[in-house]
Image: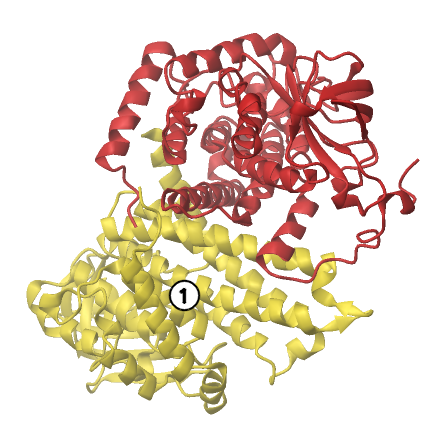
Amino acid sequence: MDFDFTDDQKAIQGEARKLLAARCDRHQVRKLLDAKAPYDAGLWATFAENGYLGTAIAERHGGLGLGRVTQCVIAEELGRALAPLPVSSSLYLAAEALMLAGDDAIQAEVLPQLASGEKIGTLALAERMRPLHALDHLECRVVDGRLRGEKLPVPHAQIADFAVVVADHEGTGAGVFWVDLRQAGVECTALPTVDSGQPQARLLFSNVPARLLHADAAAIVPKLLDRAAVYLAFEQIGGATAALELSCDYARIRKAFGRPIGSFQGIKHKLADMYTKIELARSNAFYAAWALEADAPELPLAAAAARLAATDAYEFAAKETIQTHGGIGATWEADPHLFYRRARALQSLLDSGPAWRDRLVDALHSQFAA
Amino acid sequence: MDFSDTPEEARFRSEARAWLESVAKPRDASSSFAIGQETGEFEAEFPAQRAWQQKKYDAGFGAIYFPTEFGGRGGSSLDNMTFMQEEARFDVPVTAHFMIVNRGCCSLLMRHGTPEQKKVIPASLRADSVWCQLFSEPGAGSDLAGLRTRAERDGDDWVINGQKIWTSNAQIADWGVLIARTDPTVPKHKGLTFFMLDMKSAGIECRPIKQLTGASNFNEVFLNDVRIPDTHRIGGVNEGWKVTVSFLAGERSNIAIKELMPLIGGIAELARRTTINGRPAIEDGEVRAKLASFYVREAGVRFTVQRMLTALSRGEEPGPEITIGKYTLANLVQEMTAFALDLQHAAGAVMAPDFAPFSAVFQDEWFGSVIDRLGGGTDEVLKNVVGDRILGLPADVRVDKNIPFNQTGAQG
């Protein structure tokens, strides 16, 4: 057993942190927020040039083939920096969907474009309030090879070149399709969201050609969501850790009743609780990263636990960071709301608690039965 | 990042499993998953527990991470964890509650003891000798450094007078570790000295404390002119606080290493047997949410321990990080057992083993869980440790920190 990252992975993480600290500090994040820009195109290019987008993509597909655990350590830094980049949509969702559901031809065609950052992909799965894991009777349908219907919300759709779409397949149940978004018959409407750095849009398809990747979405979607959940858990942990640091910094300097507020147990124990939730989430995420890389049968259990723990940790850290800052924490000028926004956006992105709890208990049953 | 056993680890695991299979019966999910907190009739159960520790020791599994020169196996902390994982699958007596103290005292002697003092280690690891810890006092719990028991020098001896409390196993112990005040004219942390005490010495009186469980594992210990030879002093005169801190840190990581998966399995089993609103409880959303949250925290601590073991195996010093495991598990057990009683509906209040599900083990553990939130540092004290030592937050105001102990008004 070796329950830690390798020295190489730690070095890559350090480099990513340095790059993001230089190119994506909170000043820059706020500039994008004020401009309501869906992403930072310059940073995307830099990130791509440095090879970070191809980390988990195989060398034969234009990536670096450094594996998924390495992608996880980079995810943690993206989360820490609140980076306004479509990495989650393009890599955790679209690239992983292609790796799970695509044939050799489409992988050879598209994965290099995703690894280089030249194209951005996304996953069009959600249909308004329907849980992501529910695949029966989808409104979006492919009939005679043509896609019609609405997908909403679709992350980063306004900047994506293509989408992996989950839709009813000729009346036989849900299938997985590849759809070019830069074609006539695709109407994309950007939607205001809780976090403009994690943008969403509405996609309306009017009889556009859709290429079938896999006829049985039920065999693909749960596994895809498990994989994405692990990467996102690292982003969530990175964000929560940055929020905790912000809170601790403030609690050390802000004085009330003649002493720093961090010396009061009301604040100190709250921050200790934050730390506890983050570390328990981190440990769950480590296990999930291993299960992801090893494609272990424990992945459903590990991914659900990482997802639940990281979601809980980030939500708690974000809201209590505002509370620790007092009134100033509720202003636009102060940084805590950046975390409050991102925590919620990442929580909504991949189904929230109830669905994952259900999956976890199912996985737990099979473990006890084994 | 590799969670699988290395070939060497796998060899050790199968060796451990083969031995366990040869001497014990596997535990089945629906029977025994007691985690053996401070419950039950300790003195009646102790002989079997001691015998199991001796059996493990003789087979080379009783003191895995201790060096061979002290009678240990010379293995790693990771090996020890592996053995515990395997042992958790068998229906065997629990030994943790006295071996935590025994191992802690042995580790302490290895670090701070004289060659003469170290001679007691092998017998202690085999549980031939049992240790107790004489730390807390009626007036000094979380604020341990405020203790009042006096140790005064008399020739080659120290003469001890005072009262200790919450001392597990004092009634059967052969040895105790004791912290006492040797200089009241300096601030409280600076006048303490650490000793090992022969519990058969004259002047020691143990009185059992009846706990809320009805059992009596704790004692008050009265020390009246008890003589300790100076050769049994551990560490320097007035340097006892440092020794105490290193002892308590070890205790916390021990408490964090506890196999709770069987207990979660037991609750899942219970939820299959009982109903809510006419449906099996296991199908109820709230029940599922609870089970998930139990697993997430249990796994969180279990994997945090694995991270710590990895750091240890790389030769890194363990920091205070594992502190979170202690209070997380203590609270988790309390919450899990309370929920198990909820699932039993009216029968949740029944303690009769013949009538309560699973022989009332959830009832017993629910009572016992109270103790783990207090022993080895309360939740509140440990969160201060996290805040001060990990997060670097300013310490709380301590009005007596720099005042000579005898001027703080603490001496009654």
The chain coloured red is B
The N terminus of chain A: image quadrant: top left
Q: Residue furthest bottom?
A: A35
Q: How is the image coloured?
A: by chain
Q: Residue furthest left?
A: A105
Q: Which residue is mark 1?
A: A235
Q: Say whether residue A253 is visible.
A: yes
Label 1 chain ID: A
Q: In the visual, does B221 lie left or right of A98?
A: right
The hue of chain A in the figure is yellow
Question: In this rendering, is residue B169 above or below A200?
Answer: above
Q: Residue at x 71, y 36 (%)?
A: B237
Quarter of the image for residue B139 reads top right
Quarter of the image for residue B46 reads top right
Q: Residue at x 60, y 42 (%)?
A: B327
Task: Please tell me which residue lies in front, A131 or B203.
Answer: B203
Q: Position of residue B347 (x, y in %)?
A: 64, 22
Task: Please tell me which residue lies in front, A336 or B256.
Answer: B256
The C terminus of chain A: image quadrant: top left
Q: Position of residue B15 (x, y in %)?
A: 28, 21
Q: Residue furthest front?
A: B155
Q: Residue at x 40, y 82 (%)?
A: A22
Q: Residue at x 32, y 22 (%)?
A: B16
Task: Please tell me which residue lies in front, B279 or A301.
Answer: A301
Q: Secondary structure at mark 1?
A: helix
Question: In this rendering, is residue B62 above or below B148?
Answer: above
Disc 1 marks which amino acid? Glu
Q: Residues within 10 Å of mark 1 (few under 14, many from 20)?
A: many
